[in-house]
């Protein structure tokens, strides 16, 4: 609240009579006392208002939950050849239903199959064996190593419900011992997660490159 200013105007109509002069003097004294009282109360009110304003400034806003971009962009020639399973942890861009996920293949055999899973992570940020949503993409055509990357997308019939600020993992699993190449990013390019591999596809996830590598991917949360 801004400080308020008061102007006290007094007018005294004096006459020649001494008594009336005394009364006028008493009136002026009363007016002066009233003025001081008003100024004093105004000062207290101003102090209270400033105090309330300072208290408002001291209020702490609730911290915002951490979010991720929902993707790790394809950039550069970095590749990883694997069998079994790979995974990427991530922070969702918002809370809601994860309906779609995709990765990039650079090489794979004919009639290839990939199973996409959304998993929670443990306290150390490692993917768990719990599956929140799953979809298998079949009949993926042969991808020639020398050709352009192939975007493979899974549309989850039953979406995974994600909580804002909580990390999850996107895992993809190939069939048996079939070898395939995926696009990755080096030097911790995507800071909200990291890439893991699980060659036997039994849940034994190990961070790739000491946690400095990322699988290129995107997810859709609605």
Image (cartoon, rainbow, N blue to C red):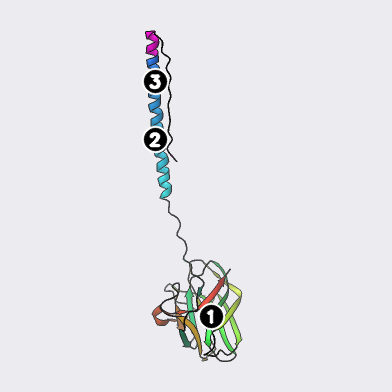
Question: Which residue is identified by label 3?
Answer: 30
| Viewer-closest of 17 and 204 | 17
Q: Are there few (<14), some (14-19), or many (20+) residues within 10 Å of tag 1?
A: many
Q: Is residue 132 magenta?
A: no
Residue found at the far top of this picture = 17
| Residue 119 percent location from the top left of the image | 51, 76
Q: Is residue 155 visible?
A: yes
* Location of residue 112 by image quarter: bottom right
> Counting residues from the N terminus, which is met first, the one under dot 3 or under dot 1?
3
| Viewer-closest of 83 and 146 | 146
Residue at the spot 60% in from the left edge and 77% down from the top edge: 155
SS at circle 2: helix
* Location of residue 222 by image quarter: bottom right
Q: Are there few (<14), some (14-19), or many (20+) residues within 10 Å of tag 2?
A: few
Question: Which residue is identified by label 2?
Answer: 44
Q: Is residue 173 visible?
A: no
> Counting residues from the N terminus, which is met first, the one under dot 3 or under dot 2?
3
Question: Which residue is identified by label 1?
Answer: 103
Q: Is residue 181 left or right of residue 14?
A: right
- Main structural element of the magenta stretch: helix, strand or loop? loop
Tally of numbered discs: 3
Contact flag, marks 3 and 2 (Cβ < 8 Å): no
SS at circle 1: strand
| The residue stretch that appears in magenta | 2-23
SS at circle 3: helix
> Counting residues from the N terminus, which is met first, the one under dot 2 or under dot 1?
2
| Viewer-closest of 53 and 189 | 189
Up-down relation of residue 129 to residue 139 (above or below): above
Residue at the spot 52% in from the left edge and 78% down from the top edge: 217
Up-down relation of residue 52 to residue 65 (above or below): above
């Amino acid at each position: 609240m801004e400080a308020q200013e008061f102007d006290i105007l007094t007018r005294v109509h004096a006459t020649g009579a001494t008594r009336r002069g005394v009364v006028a003097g008493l009136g002026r004294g009363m007016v002066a006392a009233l003025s001081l009282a008003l100024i004093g109360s105004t000062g207290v009110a101003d102090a209270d208002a400033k105090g309330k304003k300072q208290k408002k400034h001291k209020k702490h806003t609730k911290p915002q939950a951490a979010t991720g971009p929902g993707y790790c962009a394809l950039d550069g020639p970095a590749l990883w050849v694997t069998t079994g399973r790979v995974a990427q942890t991530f922070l969702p861009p918002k809370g809601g239903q994860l309906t779609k996920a995709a990765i990039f293949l650079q090489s794979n055999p004919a009639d290839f199959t990939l199973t996409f899973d959304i998993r929670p992570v443990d306290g150390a940020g490692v993917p768990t064996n719990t599956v929140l949503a799953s979809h298998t993409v079949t009949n993926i055509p042969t991808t020639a190593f020398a050709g352009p990357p192939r975007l493979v997308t899974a549309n989850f019939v039953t979406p995974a419900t994600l909580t804002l600020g909580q990390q999850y993992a996107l895992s993809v699993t190939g069939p048996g011992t079939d070898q395939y190449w995926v696009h990755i990013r080096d030097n911790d390019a995507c800071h909200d997660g990291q890439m893991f591999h699980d060659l036997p596809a039994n849940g034994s996830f190990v961070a790739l490159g000491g946690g400095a590598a990322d699988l290129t991917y995107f997810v859709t949360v609605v």
